[in-house]
Image: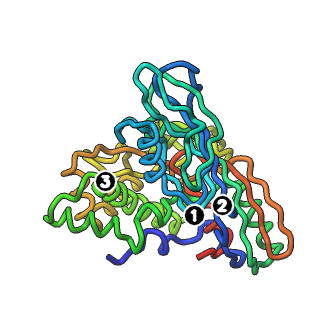
Amino acid sequence: MDFDPWRDLPAALGGIAGRGRIRARDEDFIVEEELSFALTGAGEHLFMKVRETGCNTDWVAGQLARWGGRPRNDVGYAGLKDRHAVTEQWFSVRFPGGRHPDPAGLAIPGVELLEIVPHNRKLKRGALQGNRFRLRVTALDADAALLEARLQEVQRRGVPNAFGPQRFGRESGNLQIAARWFAGGPEPPRAERGYALSAARSLIFNAVLATRIEAGDWEQAAPGDVVGLDGRGSWFIAETDDAALAGRLASLDVHPTGPMWGRGEPPGHGPAAALERDVAARFSVFADGLVAAGLEQERRALRLRVRDLAWALQGDVLELSFGLPAGAYATAVLRELLDTD
């Protein structure tokens, strides 16, 4: 494959300002989930907010199932989190009748119980408003004035909403599973199947995004482009060039979108839709495989608003805090500022 879906993405805001190290310690990368709904305080699903240090989300879910004496399928979580981080994350565990073990007996290495609230439904994947990040970049070697300018650009313009490297697996392992499967190999086990499909969709999206960054129109919408509302799944097709739409794009109220590939044609028309079809044809093994797997066309914003961005620079340490919507990657913000590989 002639395109690395992470390393081959061009810079959108002018290039990096220097280099630094992220995750020298797990405590340098702190994530806190923000649920998209209020908890009822009653019901058979026990919602548990935990702080994890150096833990894998699936592993913690398994430990909670063992603690509760429940089937693994009775445990829910909204999203996978990085192992090399400190994460405040919600899980739900179903206890029919509302009877559950004493939480004082919960002992999982690397896990601290923060909060418990009953609720009437299981926690589903993706049921997040977003995530809050607090990051610490160490061993910083950067032009301070340029870094400050880049941070202000990120605050004003946002960043490309790229899928991060973890989406594709170590050494693109998830993409390799998809490629073998789509080329006629055996269907992977259920757990690997989801990762493979997600990686294939993300490859096509990142390739469309890379092309639009190179063309300089990743922040713009021409007639026929599919435009999405910030922070929501709603979208519309831009039919005319007008000042109102230009103003909404400039204020980050709406964003151009790209394809999450599946059955059917991209909903827009004009050059952007033609570009999306061309990119899908370039990666036809993956595009055809996604269609055969039954996935439907969906949309994702090409641009990412970075909420409440704040920073402090002291010597060779940069501290950042910001919020991102669900499904967005902190690495997409960092890559516009610094080389942290």
Crowding at label 1, few (<14), some or many (≥20) Cα neighbours within 10 Å?
A: some
Crowding at label 2, few (<14), some or many (≥20) Cα neighbours within 10 Å?
A: many
36 relative to 51, above or below: above
Report which quarter residue 313 is drawn in. bottom right
Disc 2 and disc 1 in contact, CB within 8 angstroms: yes
Label 1 is placed on what type of residue?
His
The residue indicated by pointer 3 is: 191
Residue under the point 51% across and 49% down: 327
x, y (%) of residue 261?
33, 52
Whichever of callouts 3 and 1 sits on the residue coming sooner in the sequence is 1
The residue indicated by pointer 2 is: 29
Can residue 249 be seen in this snapshot?
no
Residue at mark 2 to residue at mark 1: CA–CA distance:
8 Å
Element type where label 1 sits in the image: loop
Name the one closer to the observer, 15 or 332.
Answer: 332
Name the one closer to the observer, 149 or 140.
Answer: 140
Return the mark for residue 84.
1
Q: Is residue 227 left or right of residue 274?
A: right
Can residue 207 be seen in this snapshot?
yes
Name the one closer to the observer, 182 or 156.
Answer: 182
Residue under the point 54% across and 25% down: 118
Crowding at label 3, few (<14), some or many (≥20) Cα neighbours within 10 Å?
A: few
Residue under the point 22% across and 45% down: 294
Find the residue positioned furthest to the bottom. Answer: 141
28 relative to 226, above or below: below
Whichever of callouts 2 and 1 sits on the residue coming sooner in the sequence is 2
x, y (%) of residue 201?
35, 56
Label 3 is placed on what type of residue?
Ala
Q: In this view, does 284 lie to the left or right of 170?
A: left
Label 2 is placed on what type of residue?
Phe
